[in-house]
Amino acid sequence: MWRSLVAHRNGVAVVGGSNPLTPTNKIQAYTSRMSRPHSSKLFDNPLVEATDVHFSFGHRSIFDGLNLALPRGKVTVIMGPSGCGKSTFLSMLGGRIKPDRGNLIFDGKPIPTDQGSELYEMRRKMGVMFQNNALLTDLDVYDNIAFPIREQTDLPEEIIRLMVLMKLEMVGLRGARNLMPSELSGGMARRVSLARAIALDPQLIMYDEPFVGLDPISMSVIIQLIRKLNDAMGVASVVVTHDVHEGCSIADYVYLLDNKKVVGHGSAEDMMNSSQPDIRQFMNGLPDGPVRYHYPAGNYLDDLGVHDQ
Amino acid sequence: MSFVINLGNWGLGLFYRLGAAFLFLLQALRGACQCLPRGSLIIQQIYSIGVLTMLIILVSGLFVGMVLGLQGYYQLVNFSAESSLGLVVALFLVRELGPVLAALLFAGRAGSALTAEIGLMKTTEQLAAMEMMAVNPMIRVIGPRFIAGIIAMPLLAAMMSAVGILGGYLVAHGQFGVDPGVYWTSIENGVELVDDVLNGVIKSVVFGFIVVWIALFEGYDAEPTSEGVSRATTRTVVSSSLAILGGDYILTALMFGGS
C-alpha cells in the first residue's frame, strides 16, 4: 500500500497539482523520474502516513486530497505559504482536528479522533514545540519540563530531577531552571519548549514554526538542536515552516504545500533546483508566479463601483 | 424578513451555546470526579479562588451588617422592638444577603479571574499543549477549579453572614446601646438551624456551582484573542449575576414558600 502511496505522491510532485494523470500513470511517472534510489527505502516503513486527506474549516477547504509521509529517524520539513494548512496538519497529527475524509496513520495505527484513552496513549509518543512555546506560565522552567513526566509516570522525584536536568543540559539551559517563563527571552523559551517536547523521549517531535521571531543566534541554536536531537534520539522530526533556507538546512526531506495539497517534495537540493514554476516561486521567494497573491475575490472594478460605459 | 432571520439565528446560537454548556458541564463533572484523588490541586485552587476572595467578602459583609443594623434599628425603634434587631440582621444575612451577596462578589472576583485564566490558557495554547502532552485539561485544570469553587462558596457565604452579624452588633451596641445579651439571645432563639442556616448553605452551594460552571465554560469557550477573552470575562459576570438573582428567587420560593 505504501509503495503505491509513494508513487502517487511523487507523481503529484513532479508534474504539479493539476496533472491529468491516472494513478497507474503516476506510478510510471514516479518510477521513470525518481533518480534517487534511496527514496523508496526512506519511505519503507514511515512513522506517519497521510492518504487522501480532505479537510475544511466551514466552507473553506484546507486540504483536498493531501498525501504525504514522515519517515522514521529523519527530519521532514513541511513548507508552504502562510495559511496553506501546515499547522492544521500538525493539529491533525496530534488528533486535535479530525479530517473530513482520508486516512492518517501513526506507527501503523489510525490516529484516533475521539478524545479517548487510545488517543492519549498515542500522544505520549509525540512531542510538540508550539509556535508561541505554550509554556505553563504558573510554573518555572524546571516544573514545565517535569510536568509531562509527573503527569505520565509514577517516577520518584529524584529520577524526575535527573531527567529534567538532562533535558535542560541538552538545550543548554540547566542554569535557567529556576526562571519563570516571563523571565525568558524568545530563544530561551523556545528551547525550554523543546526540552519539554522531548521530556518523555517521544517517537515523533513536531515543530510548529520554530524559527519565527528569533534573532540569528537563537535561530542557529534552534536549527542545530533540531538536527542534533533528531540524530541523537533517532526520532522522526517534522518541522513546519515557511523559512526556506533554515528549513532546507536541516531537512532530510521537504514537502511543499499549496493549493490544498502537496505540490512538490524531495530532498532540499531537489526542491531548490526544481524547475516546476510553483516550487521555484516559493523556494526563491519570487513575488510573481502561479502562487496567487490575492485572496479570491470578485471583480475589482465591480467592487469599486466602476463600470465600463 | 431579515428580522425573522436574525431572530432565528440568535435562537439557534443560543441553543447551540446552551447545548455546548451542558456538554461542558458533563465533561467538567467527570473531570472533577477523576481529579478527586489529587487533593493538592484542589487545595491550591481553594486558595486562589476562596482565600484570595476572603478580603472583599469580609469587608463587604461587615459594612452590609452595619447598614442592616442602622436601617433595622430606625424601623424597629418605632415599635419599641429594637430587642429583635439581632434576629432581623441575622435572618436577612443567613437566608438571603449572605449567600446572594457573597455569590455576586464571588462572581465578580473569582469568576472573572477563572474565565480570564482559562481563556488566556486557551489563547496561549497552554490547554492545547496539555492535550498534546496527553494530559486531559478537564482533569488537570477544570476539575480542581470546579470542586474548589463549590467548596469555597458556602464557606465565603458563611463568613459574610458571620461578619455581617458582627457588624450589626457593632452598630446596635456601639451606636444605639442595645444590650449585647438581648442582641445575641434574639439570634439564638430565632434562627433555626434547618429552616434558615441549612437553606442558606444550600443556596450558596447552588450559587457556587452556577458561578464556576459559567466562569469555566466561558473561559474554555472563549475566542482565543484578547478581545474574545475580554468578552468572555464580561459575559461571566453578567450571566452569573443574573443566574444568581433568578436562582435565588426560585430557591427562596421552593424553600420558604410553604412556611
Image (spheres, helix red, strand yellow):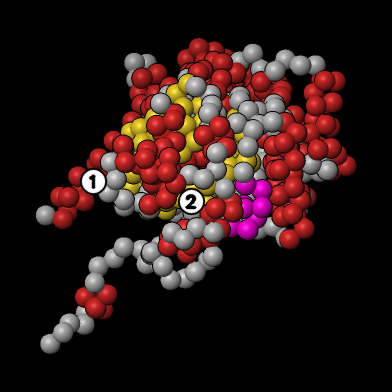
- Mark 1 or mark 2, which is nearer to you? 2
Q: Is residue A13 above or below residue B76?
A: below
The structure residue drawn at horizontal position 77% and vertical position 58%, both measured from the top left corner, is A217
Q: Nearer the viewer, residue A32 or A291?
A: A32
How far apart marks 1 and 2 lie (CA) works out to 40 Å
Chain letter of mark 1 equals B
Chain letter of mark 2 equals A
Residue A199 as seen in the image, left or right of residue B221: right
Residue range (magenta): A244-251
Dot 2: within a 10 Å radius of its alpha carbon, few (fewer than 14), some, or many (20 or more) residues? many
The chief SS type of the magenta part is: helix
Judging by the rendered image, the residue that carries numbered circle 2 is A256
Q: Is residue A2 magenta?
A: no
Residue B91 as seen in the image, left or right of residue B57: left
Q: Whole-percent x and y of residue A275? A: 46, 61
Q: Quadrant of residue B176?
A: top right
Residue B2 as seen in the image, left or right of residue A164: left
Q: Nearer the viewer, residue A215 or B106?
A: A215
Q: Quadrant of the N terminus of chain B?
A: bottom left
Amino acid found under the numbered disc labelled 1: Asn
The structure residue drawn at horizontal position 69% and vertical position 57%, both measured from the top left corner, is A214
Going by the picture, which residue comes out furthest to the bottom?
Answer: A309
Judging by the rendered image, the residue that carries numbered circle 1 is B9
- Residue B84 in sight in this render: no
Q: Secondary structure at mark 1?
A: helix
Q: Quadrant of residue B135?
A: top right
Amino acid found under the numbered disc labelled 2: Leu
Q: Secondary structure at mark 2?
A: strand
